[in-house]
Image (spheres, coloured by chain):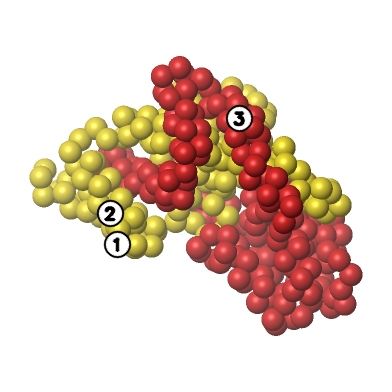
Amino acid sequence: MSILAFAAWLFYFNLLTLGKGLLMIPLIQGHLVEGAQVLTGDQLLMAVAIGQVTPGPGNIYVAAVGYLIYGLPGAVVALVAVVLPSFGALALTHGYQRLKTNRIAQGFFKGLTTTALGLIFYSALLLAREAITSGQALAVLILGFVLIQFVKVNPILSLLAASLFGLVLHFALG
Amino acid sequence: MDTESEPIGLVDLFRIFLLGGLTFGGGLAIITVLERELISKRRAIARQDFLTYYALARVVPTGTQTALAVSLGNHFAGFRGSVVAVAGLLTPVFVATVALTALFTYGVASGARELLPKTVLPAALALIVVGAVSMGRDLFGLKRETLLATTGFLAALLLHVPPGLVLVLGGVAGIFLFRGEARKEAKK
């Protein structure tokens, strides 16, 4: 896959998912991991992890995806691809009210984001098949889930704590 | 959008959005910094205008924070202002992302890299699962939403329909499924 084709895919993914980083995961997973096979599931998870421990907007983890495939040019191209649609805000200033009250646009976006939710579960299932290859990995996944979902620990701290737990398990169990 | 704005130069603009880009905690944390810098401290823009730009940024099919940077940058300094504001906002995250990815790719010893599948990777997967569960919590009590999300899941899993196509089809289905809600929203 050429770097331009990669940029075009990201531009399309970003537009389709309204720039929501989490919703982009199934698309990246489907087209770049399963389809073109230019990225592995583990690399995608690493990019998501990096996105969690960096400041600023959440969808810029795609720069890590670009870097992993093409190096620094890939990171720059990925950044540009997801930022470019933001300039549509200038054009929208005038048509805002019309879009806000447009029933077709409203229904389309609601349908799209609802469907994306099902796709995130699908993506998580495929990534789990690749990432959960041992009992230790499963324990880390469960701990991470419990910490964020039930104990309400900050995602960055949860990521670090669950990773540390995995490390301890590795050395304890050998 | 007429407002009595204090002139804000390109350097100020870069600095303010850089501060926003340095915050952890996602969109709301960034908005809080911008609100404090532009409205409370500098009184550079009316609150109503700020909120209108925010509402606009939410409509643009892309990240809300970058779209807000484009709008506010344009408000203060035209197109150059948009570019400078976006550059300020994204510099911290871009530099940090590239540095960490490079560290992972070249800096981490192969022994340490072998530990990743037992440490960071399953923990990152937990984040994705939690994200999906949190987003689903509001929707899964609702029949049409649950039906649409489940159909999308099954279409990808069993029929191997490409995710992009699933999303577009979901959007088209949404036009018909959520017609009533959109009508109510439009009346508001």
Q: Please give the residue where the numbered disc 3 appears in the rendered image.
A: B173
Label 1: how many Cα within 10 Å (few below 14, some 14–19, many 20+): few
Q: How many marks?
A: 3
User: Are the residues under marks 1 and 2 on the same chain?
Assistant: yes
User: Are the residues under marks 1 and 3 on the same chain?
Assistant: no
Q: Is B133 left, or right, of A10 in this rendering? A: left
**Residue type marked 2:** Val
Q: Pointer 3 indicates a residue of which chain? A: B
SS class, disc 2: helix
The percent position of residue B13, horizontal first and vertical second, equals 75, 68
**Residue type marked 1:** Val
Q: Nearer the viewer, residue B184 or B157?
A: B184
Q: Which mark is residue A151?
A: 1
In the rendered image of the structure, the colour used to display chain B is red
Locate the C terminus of chain B by quadrant.
bottom right
How far is disc 2 from disc 3 in space, using C-alphas?
34 Å
How far is disc 1 from disc 3 in space, using C-alphas?
37 Å
What's the residue at 32%, 34% (across, down)?
Answer: A128
How far is disc 1 from disc 2 in space, using C-alphas?
6 Å
- Residue B91 visible? The answer is yes
